[in-house]
Amino acid sequence: MEDMKHLLTLMDLDDQEIVQLLDLADQLKYEKKHGIAHPHLKGKSIGLIFQKASTRTRVSFETGMHQLGGQALFLSSRDLQIGRGEPVQDTARVLSRYLDGIMIRTYEQKEVEDLAKYGSIPVINGLTDYSHPCQVLADLMTIREHYGSLKGLKMAYIGDGNNMANSLIVGALKSGMDMACATPEGYRPDEKVLEFAKNYGDHFTLTDDPVQAVKGADVVVTDTWASMGQEDEKEERKKAFAGYQVNRALMKHAKNGAMVLHCLPAYREQEITEEVFEQHADEIFEEAENRLHAQKAVMVTLMKD
Ligand code: CP
Ligand code: NVA
């Protein structure tokens, strides 16, 4: 994985690099559970830039870095000069002189790419409007733990063609899974991602019919209908996504015993019913835990000497 300098999108990783990250994440999880110290990043610092809210990403990066023997700095854009208009090019060059890595959660994917372009340290995408690669690594890890392997499984994603949909499509297809995505027209995944998915022929399906997508699925995934930054569209989106709820009736079409995943936060009785959420709570909270292990694997891969 010597080529891996940043984690900007899953598109940048080859299939083998994804497997290697998941293997390392499994190993770090094992070591954590068995009290085996793994201070791979002793003396290193990572800056965590947040332009949007977060519970999981912030806490898992901070504690993950601590467990690796390094330190994490929480940098809210409310307090940084970047929030007052300092160019990202300058921020990148300054932070590169203090830190060993940067994680950034922001709106535009271009800002993450610019940070990587102008800085000289590894950059990790902690969510943009376009993608959420750390989350999807944790999702793939959770599915692999459950089924033993990913190849040949079918994932169905139901709801908004957002950052999660984009990253799930890329991550699932690169992992040898079949992927069916049900989104209403006007809320499709990104064009670049759909173009990428064409390389996988029948292994990818895009439909506006949730029942068709879920048919025979081993894993059903959904996400909020109104992502961060879309708060004003909440009511309009509720109407557009009526019929795209993961509920008992829809789950009847999935394989018996299929998993349900949700990156969280989850909005009950909107994208998922309380009933289905609670039936699959063990899987969903394992998925949340796996953020910690997957991101530790990413930091070790990118930042270890
Ligand atoms: N799933 C996820 O990224 O959660 P946070 O927004 O709480 O970080
Ligand atoms: N699609 C959601 C994911 C939150 C983790 C958002 O961008 O707000």
Image (spheres, rainbow, N blue to C red):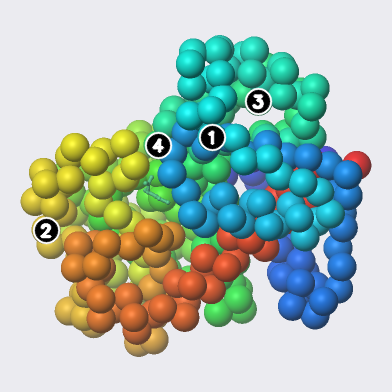
Label 3, residues with CA under 10 Å away: few <14, some 14-19, many ≥20: many
As measured in the structure, the alpha-carbon distance from the residue carrying label 4 to the one carrying label 3 is: 17 Å
Residue toward you, 180 or 248: 248
Tell me the mark number nearer the camera, choosing from 1 and 4: 1
Label 2, residues with CA under 10 Å away: few <14, some 14-19, many ≥20: few
As measured in the structure, the alpha-carbon distance from the residue carrying label 3 to the one carrying label 1 is: 19 Å
Q: Earlier in the sequence, mark 1 or mark 2?
A: 1
At horizontal 71% and vertical 16% (from top left) the residue drawn is 93
Residue assigned mark 2: 242
**Disc 4 and disc 3 in contact, CB within 8 angstroms:** no
Residue assigned mark 1: 76
As measured in the structure, the alpha-carbon distance from the residue carrying label 1 to the one carrying label 2 is: 35 Å
Amino acid at circle 1: Ser
**Disc 2 and disc 3 in contact, CB within 8 angstroms:** no
Residue 276, given in percent of the width and then of the height, sits at: 29, 78
Task: Say which mark, if any, is on residue 129.
Answer: 4
Work out which quarter of the rendered image holds the C terminus and state it. top right
| Helix, strand or loop under label 4 | loop
Q: Is mark 4 within 8 Å of ligand 2?
A: yes
Q: Is residue 9 at least partly visible in the picture?
A: no
| Helix, strand or loop under label 1 | strand
As measured in the structure, the alpha-carbon distance from the residue carrying label 2 to the one carrying label 3 is: 39 Å
Work out which quarter of the rendered image holds the N terminus and state it. top right
Amino acid at circle 3: Ala
**Disc 1 and disc 2 in contact, CB within 8 angstroms:** no
